[in-house]
Amino acid sequence: MNNQANKLKTLVSSSTVPRSTHFIAVTSGKGGVGKSTISANLANVLANNGYKVALFDADIGLANLDVILNVRVNKNLLHVLKGECSLNDILVQIKPNLILIPGESGDEILKFNNQFLYERFLDEASALNDLDFLIIDTGAGIGGNTHLFLEAADEVIVVTVPDPAAITDAYAVIKVTSRVKNNIFMLFNMVKNEKEAVKIFENIRKVAKANITNDLNLELIGYLSENKNVSNSIKQRTLFTDDAEFSTSSGELKEIASKLLYRLERKVLDTSENRSFGGFFKRLIEQF
């Protein structure tokens, strides 16, 4: 992890390589599988390794990262889009290199349509153009506007647990997302061990290969085994990657982060599109 991190930091900080933001959407087929906890701790691992990271709470209708991170949020992105405050007013500094962009616990945020305020927002968004990562915690399922975030992201991670209903719903998300993404990651949470994660993944990949006609590369990015450290941190509204930095779960998540860093290393020299926070949100808005 450290060697990979140091190598990438050199690339990112190089004067010959424009800084670009890597957009990672974390989603799931159903709620209750640990998606938001994984989003928050993944962002924390990256921030602890010196990357500038923002967590975007895009779980429209059930935004809850503020609860997980134990911070108070008075205003959110909807207030910015309404012109009631600036983007900078809603940003919550969680720790050095890690900020929260609060979402709205309702669907009005994606119905608000004022071109002047959107343009002002995009101008203000330039303040976040130095981000290395934007972790997007989307809503669960394939309904609503979740697919907009998945399409606009660079990488999509589908989180599930070893439960038949959750696996079925996760496959539904994979099938729909495969229409716009050729590469999709899967992350298994609360598994007994690596063997269980690999076995379920191979079954899903077999079904996907037989039924999805698109050229899909479905990849297992990692797993988190059942661990009391994780459940305890959720109850205490803390991050297990801080509370139990050297635990099995933290080690497993660091391995997942390492794979993402490798993917970014391969893409960091691609300057064919605007890879800023403002550019990302512009692409998102244009889909509304």
Image (cartoon, rainbow, N blue to C red):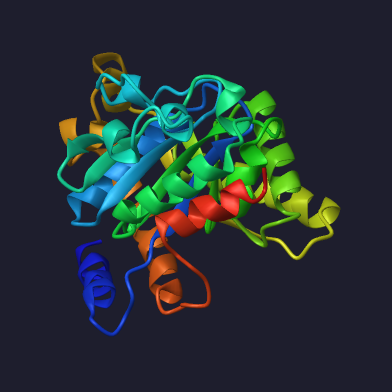
- The residue lying toward the viewer, choosing from 229 and 200, is 229
Residue 36, quarter of picture:
top left
Q: Is residue 65 above or below residue 245?
A: above
Is residue 244 in view from this perspective? no
Q: Residue at x 28, y 39 (%)?
A: 88
Location of residue 182 by image quarter: bottom right
| Closer to the camera in the image, 76 or 163 | 76
Establish if 94 lies above or below 285: above
Residue 274: x and y in percent read: 48, 67
Q: Position of residue 229 (x, y in %)?
A: 26, 26
> Which residue extends farthest top?
235
Does residue 96 lie above or below 2 as drawn?
above
Q: Position of residue 264 (x, y in %)?
A: 41, 67
Q: Residue at x 44, y 67 (%)?
A: 263
Q: Quarter holding the C terminus? A: top right
Q: In percent of the image, x 46 and y 42: which residue is there? A: 136
Q: Please indicate, yes or no, whether residue 160 appears anywhere in the rendered image.
A: yes
Q: How many marks?
A: 0
**Which residue is at a point 68% across and 30% down the rendered structure image?**
144
User: In front: 80, or 211?
Assistant: 80
Q: Depth check: give the residue in front, 203 or 143.
A: 143
Say which quadrant the N terminus sits in.
bottom left
On the image, the x and y values in percent for residue 87 come to 34, 39
Q: Residue furthest bottom?
A: 16
Residue 159, above or below 214: above
Q: As drawn, is 107 to the left or to the right of 63?
A: right
